[in-house]
Image (tube, rainbow, N blue to C red):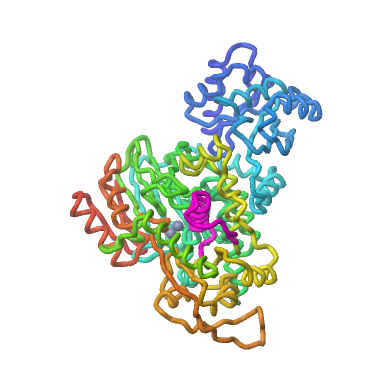
Amino acid sequence: MSIVEERLEDIKSTIAAETPPGISVTSVTYEGPELVVYTTNPREFASEGELIRKLASKLRKRITIRPDPESLMPEQAASERILEVIPEDAGVTNLDFHKDIGEVLIEAEKPGLVIGRHGKTLRDITMAVGWTPEVVRTPPIESATVSNVRSFLKQEREERREILERVGRQIHRELLSDDEWVRITTLGCCREVGRAAFILSTPDTRILIDCGDKPGAEGEVPYLHVPEATPINSIDAVVLTHAHLDHSALLPLLFKYGYDGPIYTTEPTRDLMGLLQLDYLDVATKEGRTPPYGSEMVREEIKHTIPVEYGDVTDIAPDVKLTMHNAGHILGSAVAHFHIGEGLYNVAFSGDIHYKETRLFNGAINDFPRVETLVLESTYGGRNDYQTDREDSERTLKQIINETYERGGKVLIPSFAVGRSQEIMLVLEEAMREGDIPSMPVHLDGMIWEATAIHTTYPEYFRDELRDKIFHEDENPFLADEFNHIDEGEDEREEIASDEPSIILSTSGMMTGGPIMSWLDLLGRDTDSTLVFVGYQAEGTLGRRIQNGRREIPLSSSRQDDGRGRTLRLEMGVETVDGFSGHADRRGLMNYVRTMNPRPEKVLCVHGDESSTQSLSSALYHEFNIRTFAPRNLETFRFR
Ligand SMILES: [Zn+2]
Ligand SMILES: [Zn+2]
């Protein structure tokens, strides 16, 4: 018997000893990090309210109960019973039965009401029909991404189960080495922003954290061919901190290279990365570049993704436990904490963080049971990287909107689809509701609408106040009447451009392409209108050139295509309002470490240009007397 089987036998006897007579456990198995318990008595299991929770904490595993098919109520009857058990307010939109695993997937507008207090309604469902319920939210704004991901996972469930079983055996395999060491190898993202990729290794295990591209430098990809990452299928697990392309763009490439293991990330990150990667492929094709992988690799990646929730401790290797925590940066973004060995060592990767709360998210978590080394982003780590106070920024933005409105002009805001747009939407919604600015249409162009729809699918990831508002007061600011989805292309844009005053949020955020170019063409000559930058404009982008005063804009117009490019003389107002960044500034980064509990022994400053990483590294050393580094790419650090 292999060690995995022996352990499963042990677990089976433990469970048998803990369960009252009359409940039979036919078998137990691993599916990914979860333990699956098969029983012929699902109703009895559910009626012992605390039993599953007790077993989970005793075995330190997440537990799923799989009923024997014989014990299930037939689907039609079960359907009717389930709808009787669930309160009507829950707004159930779909029930989907999976007989092979005895699971019923319930889609509802208010999942909380399907779950009930401490899961009571879920247990009631099992007691009534025998099936194991799983609940997902029906997005209040229809999202093509969410529905595609869900139906794809449904269609691939057979193969997905095989993947999970294989991953489960990998996680619970025997450790081969008695050595104890922990290393981090930097494959990118050092003294630069972009191509985030790090290998965390122990004698038995290799974990890859992030695998991004470098915006504006397509050839510069992570150093995946180093010995620490070769062959690619020697990597046990991939952990993704968040969906931004400088962290996620090249994950699908791993599957093209032969990786066949799991990706751990949050559920919203899974959906957002799919959206952003498919767009990344699209943009590459449109710009005449050969994309590094095809869309089928994005599907492979999603098939291999194991979602984790904030705060859940998950075994991802025999000697590594992962816990993800809110990073405050974008939807689903996480600080990834790794506990290695039995108390041997702890490392936290910050990913990108925002230390203070924003309108959308709580501030980044910096409270851990233990942490010896922190790998910290340094985007705004430079000596003078201080952002304007958020309230001041909001006031300035509202003032610009009011002035433009009075002139009868339009406010054009180039914005990233994920994060910045939703933050601005919340500012605008409140300003209109409170009368700080007149109520007017806010048009959302490009991927912004779809990204917002994904946001509304996962309100539990929002800041407490916003979540409460949505859950308890039934007020969802994203559903405000003023927001309009531009879905009819150029005709609709032309109509809006000649219509009453309005606000337009459009991609791309740095004006490197996308519908914002049409808007420039339509509004650029209008002296009454204003172009407002609310996000970082990278060197070399059109956004940065306009910020720097350039007013002759080359347009390769698809609107009035005469086969030649034209030059537009920009006459609209140009303003910059900073302070809406999703990143902590220098003060925020210092405070993150200052208040970190416990304070780390070592900090690696990454994800910032050369001067930012060095400046932050030296400031942290002088202020807190901890060992700090500003690594270069391809370095390896040994911690134990
Ligand atoms: Zn980011
Ligand atoms: Zn980043």
In which quadrant of the rendered view does residue 67 lie? top right
The residue drawn where x is 66% and y is 72% is: 494
Q: Is residue 42 left or right of residue 19?
A: right
Q: Position of residue 122 (x, y in %)?
A: 63, 26
Which region of the structure is painted magenta? Answer: 415-443
Examine the rendered structure and indicate whether residue 427 appears above or below residue 172.
below
Magenta includes 424?
Answer: yes
Picture quarter with the N terminus: top right
The residue drawn where x is 51% and y is 84% is: 569
Residue 238 visible here? no
In the image, ligand 1 is in what quadrant?
bottom left
Q: Nearer the viewer, residue 584 or 568?
A: 568
The residue drawn where x is 47% and y is 38% is: 315
Examine the rendered structure and indicate whether residue 603 appears above or below residue 68.
below
Q: Nearer the viewer, residue 509 or 47?
A: 509
Magenta includes 320?
Answer: no
Q: Position of residue 568 (x, y in %)?
A: 54, 83
